Image (cartoon, coloured by chain):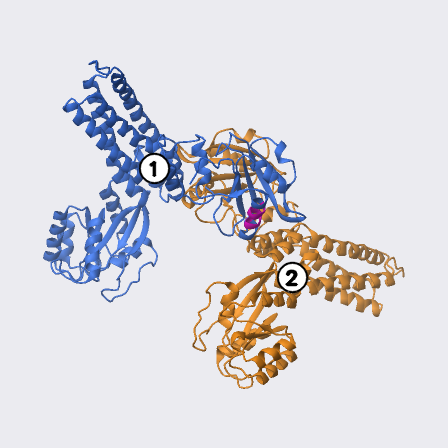
Chain colours: A orange, B blue
Amino acid sequence: MAFRTDLEDTIVALATPQGVGAIALIRLSGPKAIGLTNQVFHGKDLTQVKSHTVHFGTIRDGERILDEVLVSVFREPRSFTKENITEISCHGSPYLAQQIIKLLIRQGARPARAGEFTQRAFLHGQFDLAQAEAIADIISADSEAAHRAAMQQMRGGFSAEIKRLREKLVHFASMVELELDFGEEDVEFADRDDLRQLVEELQKVIQALIDSFDVGNVIKNGVPTVIAGKPNAGKSTLLNALLQEEKAIVSDIAGTTRDFIEDELILGGVSFRFIDTAGLRETTDTVEAMGVERTQAKMKEASLILYLFDLKAEPLTEILQEVNRLENQGIPFIPIGNKIDQASEEVREALEKRGDFALISAKAGEHLEVLKELVLAKTQLDSFRTGDTLVTNVRHYDSLLRTRDSLGKVLEGLAVSVTGDFLAMDIRQALHYLGEITGEITTDDLLANIFSKFCIGK
Amino acid sequence: MAFRTDLEDTIVALATPQGVGAIALIRLSGPKAIGLTNQVFHGKDLTQVKSHTVHFGTIRDGERILDEVLVSVFREPRSFTKENITEISCHGSPYLAQQIIKLLIRQGARPARAGEFTQRAFLHGQFDLAQAEAIADIISADSEAAHRAAMQQMRGGFSAEIKRLREKLVHFASMVELELDFGEEDVEFADRDDLRQLVEELQKVIQALIDSFDVGNVIKNGVPTVIAGKPNAGKSTLLNALLQEEKAIVSDIAGTTRDFIEDELILGGVSFRFIDTAGLRETTDTVEAMGVERTQAKMKEASLILYLFDLKAEPLTEILQEVNRLENQGIPFIPIGNKIDQASEEVREALEKRGDFALISAKAGEHLEVLKELVLAKTQLDSFRTGDTLVTNVRHYDSLLRTRDSLGKVLEGLAVSVTGDFLAMDIRQALHYLGEITGEITTDDLLANIFSKFCIGK
């Protein structure tokens, strides 16, 4: 796809969600945006109005009035795309919006591809690639944490960090490359010790960014949380109580839940993806049913396990054995004593003494607040509030891993005193990967891949 | 509900459809719309900017940046509601829009009720009630015909007609009432012959409007079209072929369609609501199954029946008998010979000679275009293109019926020379009903009833 060659087109798309509403917004961008809109607009001559002004009038298809509208005019470069933009605010009828878009296409506009407005903004230097990607993240963010991370990225926090790293490396790369011009002469413009120190510093920063992906990823996609436990321990009841709505089918018959029901709960601004599982029907040694196997697999993928015990039915010794086993697995978990209202005095006292159990009644919805606090404490995701840069994008994560590897090779080269041309190659490679993140290095394929995931009209 | 008393509130709502998109629009209206928006907006001082201008900035909740936005400012009375309006164009994330709306509510805005923006526009005299109602019709219009009718109403065509009628009557009403002031004296300012002539003229116009509701209603809601015929005649197959998608379950087993499947097809700008029916399993004399009874009922409600015959299985004599019976029912119908590719030479020739049959193969999708043209010709709804006023609103229809009855009483009174006070009463009653249409006569209940059917944000 020749993305850079069709900037002469004027593109059009519905910018607001599909469906019925009070208002729908149709957006045009490109050299002829104002002229094309003016051809179908009856009101002021839009070609003569100032940028950032709004005008009332009608959209007409020949004699037929399609709608009474407001048109906002933005003149390049003072617009989102840095091109001429018009936004037509019409009545929120899908039929009507479609008619107006068809009319504009007949006038010479082209339907916009997914993400094409944002892509044009990027190509015209409105923002870098990481910032463009953050726009999609902002639109899909559904928790405070995800929104904060995306907003920081869109505002350029992450980009600034990457650029700082690149600039330092660029300096050394050019010094090393300068040496090459002197061919056989044995000069070193780039001090090797300084270079090693710089690369080691960069490695630390990059490693920190890589590590932040663990948090960034779960903040963006939700903390995968498994509710596990023996059949009939009350797993579905707990999920429902937490969601305060009936998403899972609850029954007294053990084994009701055959499939994985995913749902989301926002706690303290963080999204938790709760994964209900088929009950652990057999002892953990003799796993048989497929649902149980899958539960085991899910537990290994989880960031957090809520492990439910039926205090009415399960003997204390077995419960404590199971907790021991879980502790040895190394996955963060919260042991939950369910049906506390039906537990024996002895069991209740023993577990209260331990202090690590959440003692609840899922059915009665009792002590759930305590459980929620435990969940938040266990995940320690409050760091999103500190404003530290978080890597949330798997593409960025991937580029950072490659950067780290390239820098590793630079260090290896320095250790064995390789020649300048090899050093320069590895430094350039690291620069390439860093540049991919912010879009200083791009290919049409990369852009197509990124922007095709956007919605049409963005 | 005290609708007129809370115009001092500044109201806020999402104006664009729910869901994910590039852009969401949040609208505020009321005395403090600009001030409240300015409290959370970082950029230019919005209280100082001109009307109809757009401003880039950020929405902040304390230190936290919620989004980068464009804010359009409209100063009263140059706005939709004739109040101060701001429109905040933010990224199209449901989470984000909700956060911004919550923030504005904390600043002092009130969530808007359904239709409250349009209601305020009406209360401030932006347009009359019939025009306000047309806005909802424009939003829900999904065919050219429905859109044209709604647009004509919104642009005031219908209102102008009603106002013309009212003005003529008002003149006579005041003349008759003037007579009452003279008490016992036997004066007649209002010439009784002139009055009779006027009322008769009005009756004609109102009757024409009442009659137009037949067309207006089907244009707004779709022409109810029944596909009928014996089991296995190919009714579901025809519906699917017409819709070019698989909405009905098609099988070779007679009686597959147990329920009514409604779907819509736009032909020549008119919406047809196709109603698939349970097959007419028995002869029409011995109706048994409930589905068949319901089919009979549906056929009576229909504006058009597509009656399908299986040319492969049904004998010609029976087909022609059935057509005779249908002709006697008086409902417009189109006899369709299906499976024409499997019909005998004799049957094909006989039906071709008659000329009133649509001869098709629903399965192969053959000759469907001819059928579509027949459907359009049969309904004769092209009148919507003439620009004649159509009554599409059942509330208006109802008021017109009452107006007609009141005018009937005026004529009866004139025939028996009743006294002026009785005449005046009936004329005032007719004026009242006409005034209800355009909102010159309103009650809070009437307004609440009308605007509560709007969507929030409109």
Say the numbered circle drawn on residue A216.
2
Residue at x 51% of width, y 63% of height: A243
Q: Is residue A260 visible?
A: no
Q: Position of residue A282 (x, y in %)?
A: 51, 83
Image side of residue A309 versus residue B113, left or right: right
- Comparing B91 with A74, the one in front is B91
Q: Position of residue B114 (x, y in %)?
A: 44, 44
Q: Determine if residue B9 is in view.
A: yes
Q: Residue at x 22, y 43 (%)?
A: B378
Asked if the residues shown at circle 1 and circle 2 are in contact, with their CB atoms under 8 angstroms apart, the answer is no
Residue A304, labelled with which disc? none
Q: Three-letter amino acid code at disc 2?
A: Gly
Q: Position of residue B313 (x, y in %)?
A: 16, 62
Residue A331 placement: quadrant: bottom right
Q: Bounds of the magenta span?
A: B97-103
Q: Nearer the viewer, residue A53 or B4?
A: B4
Q: Nearer the viewer, residue B114 or A162?
A: B114
Q: Is residue B369 left or right of residue A347?
A: left
- The answer to whether dots 1 and 2 both sit on one chain is no
Specify the amino acid type for callout 1.
Answer: Ala
Where A56 falls versus A265 (above or below)?
Answer: above
Residue B99 part of the magenta-drawn span: yes
Chain holding disc 1: B
The residues tagged by marks 1 and 2 sit, at their Cα atoms, a distance apart of: 53 Å
Secondary structure of residue under mark 1: helix
Q: Which mark is residue B149?
A: 1
Instruction: Give the class, few, some or many, for how many residues have Cα within 10 Å of label 2's Cα (few <14, many ≥20).
Output: many
